[in-house]
Image (cartoon, rainbow, N blue to C red):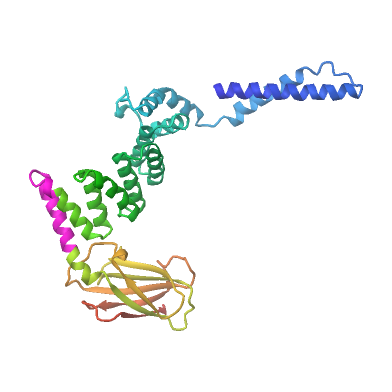
Amino acid sequence: MMLWVMSLVLLLILATMLWLMWRSEARKAGKNMSGALGIPLVMVILAGAGYGLIGLNEHTGTWLTHKQEYGDVAQQIIAGQPPEKAASEVPAGALVRVLQSELSQTPSAVGWYALGALYDQLGAPVQTEEAARKALQLNPENAAMHLLLARALIEKNEARLTDPALDEIRWVLDREPNHDGAWMLLAMSADRAGRYALAEQAWASLLSRHSQGETADLLQRGLNRAREQKQREGLFANLSATVHGENLPAGGTLFVFLREAGSAGQPLAAQRKVVPHFPINIELTAANWLQSYPDEQADLVIGARYTPAPGASVDQAAITAVPTPLKLPQRQPAVLNLSRQ
């Protein structure tokens, strides 16, 4: 409402100035301007009607209601005070909008952290990252804010650990070596990323402090899995194939995949690459694995699909290579021959 009133006042001032200039020029030309005093008033009325009928956003009413209901909660959060309303009484989406507005006027580290935590709760990692970085600009020594940023970076990478996220986690562990939250975040994200040495270290640290009670079995299973996968890494982490494309134009998109024979759905490992020439050698490293390493006796096949259009989808590509059985340990690259189907 205050913004609407200020807008009308500004319009009135501008209309009056315009009218005064108009009257001055008219007098110089010898014209009579009597009766023209109502022009500014008419302009203001028309502008106000236009704003009310067109300029008022359909969500403004809801926004003003949320602002009135949760404005105090947002201000209390920004001030680092416990809100008077319970979290269950405040919709996260509404509080996000109000808190964002309040922070634009009164920024605070705890406020940006709270906003980032809300975005994290809502599954918005890009916004979580932005809020966490703003919180850290104001309070760079806060461990919780570093972990919030790490979670955002991990979620942006499909729950897999990234090097920037690892830097944030290590910042915390360098100062708090027994921080269970940091170790758990590292254990789970490293496992998802296939970085099993880090996952093993994290699970072992957690188990050393929680070897009793209900969580011990879960932690032990996580540790056993990381160690098992780490042992298989030498066998599965460096597989290769030479892909031939006789009479096919280079420059397209190649998709090489590894899966268990007869299986469908997500492959075990895959790599997508623009092909500068044929034949081309493709390596499937630990970074290309999408699932856990299979049993050493698993029956695996490796295949490929190709489309001449760079960057195009190869899911329905008509140029394929028949999946070839993969013998382990691999002594030489598998040979894949692309052909039109």
- Along the horizontal axis of the image, is 138 left or right of 291? right
> Which residue corresponds to the image point at 29% horizontal and 64% vertical from the top-left?
289
| Residue 174, above or below 113 | below
Residue at the extreme bottom: 246
Residue 54 rendering spot, x and y as whole percentages: 61, 31
Residue 191 rendering spot, x and y as whole percentages: 24, 56
User: Over which residues does the magenta segment extend?
Assistant: 207-229
Q: Nearer the viewer, residue 144 or 57?
A: 144
Asked if the stretch drawn in magenta spans residue 271, the answer is no
Question: Quadrant where the C terminus lies?
Answer: bottom left
Residue 278 rendering spot, x and y as whole percentages: 43, 80
Residue 27 rendering spot, x and y as whole percentages: 88, 21
Q: How many numbered markers are drawn?
A: 0
Asked if the stretch drawn in magenta spans residue 214, the answer is yes
Quadrant location of residue 314? bottom left
Quadrant location of residue 254? bottom left
Quadrant location of residue 38? top right
> Which residue corresponds to the image point at 49% horizontal and 27% vertical from the top-left?
61
Question: Quadrant where the N terminus lies?
Answer: top right
Q: Main secondary structure of the magenta part?
A: helix
Q: Nearer the viewer, residue 49 or 281?
A: 281
Residue at the extreme right: 30
> Which residue corresponds to the image point at 21% horizontal and 60% vertical from the top-left?
197
- Along the horizontal axis of the image, is 197 left or right of 163? left
Residue at the extreme left: 212
